[in-house]
Image: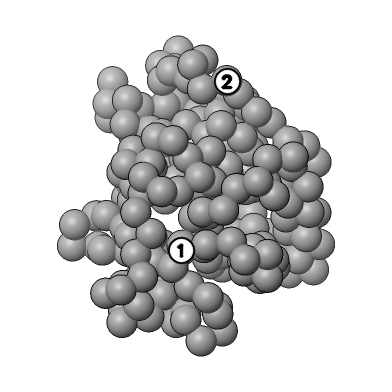
Amino acid sequence: MIDTFARERSHMRRLLLAERDRLSPATRAAESGRIVASLVALPFFSEKQHFFIYCHYRSEVSTDTLLAYCLEQGKTVGVPMSLPEQAQMLAVVITDPVHDLAPGYKGIPEPLPALARDWLLPPTAIEVAVIPGAVFDRTGHRLGYGLGFYDRFLALAPQAIRIGLAFSCQMVERIPALDHDVPMDMVITEREILTWPRRTHAPDRGL
């Protein structure tokens, strides 16, 4: 059963990432703008202070304008720093994306290592976590890139509102979820905002 789930998840990941990669740069930019505009317009957004926001890579929904907006609003912004040896990540506070970020693990923009010594954002302090993914479904489950970094990190921040950003081409009806998958509270695409009461989340092995 585990092998069947792994193959199905891997196939789904490859298929939907290829769909995302086929979006033109202009389309990704325009749809990213709509997604970010929907996020910052949410009623709770202005009330929160401590954010964890991914730095987009390749064809992911762009977070450049979101990072800039949050910093302009005086919010505390932590971004991921990968620790590949431990398959973990840290949230490192930045104040200037241009000067604080550089290509890190797998070329993904990450905080400069020197910042991690003094500017960590504890997972327990995070109020909103903005998360990327390969695939999201209409029950709140997320399929990442196969390493589990975000699932392990989010398990340390149970109080955070978990928001996935995705293009509509990354949405499916149901992902074959596993016990360790951390579900989203909300997914925002260029077309819709989906939300789920956290108590309803449970791995679905019914595919």
Count the marks: how many? 2
- From the viewer's perspective, is residue 32 above or below residue 166? below
Please report contact status of discs 2 and 1: CB closer than 8 Å, yes or no: no
Query: Residue 197, which numbered label?
Result: 2
Q: Secondary structure at mark 2?
A: loop
Residue 48 visible in the snapshot:
yes
Residue 24 visible in the snapshot:
no
Query: Residue 79, which numbered label?
Result: 1
**Picture coordinates of residue 41, whole percent (x, y):** 78, 47
Q: Decide which of 42, 187 is in the foreground and name it.
A: 42
Q: Is residue 133 left or right of residue 65?
A: left
Q: Quadrant of residue 68?
A: bottom right
* Residue at horizontal 78 percent and vertical 54 percent from the top: 37
* Residue at horizontal 25 percent and vertical 62 percent from the top: 84
In primary-sequence order, the first of circles 2 and 1 is 1
The amino acid sitting under disc 1 is: Val
**Picture coordinates of residue 81, whole percent (x, y):** 36, 66
* Residue at horizontal 34 percent and vertical 64 percent from the top: 120
Q: Decide which of 15, 137 is in the foreground and name it.
A: 137
Badge 2 density bin: few <14, some 14–19, many ≥20, Cα 10 Å: few
C-alpha gap between disc 2 and disc 1: 26 Å
The amino acid sitting under disc 2 is: Pro
Which residue is the extreme one toward the bottom?
99
* Residue at horizontal 19 percent and vertical 57 percent from the top: 86
Q: Quadrant of residue 7?
A: top left
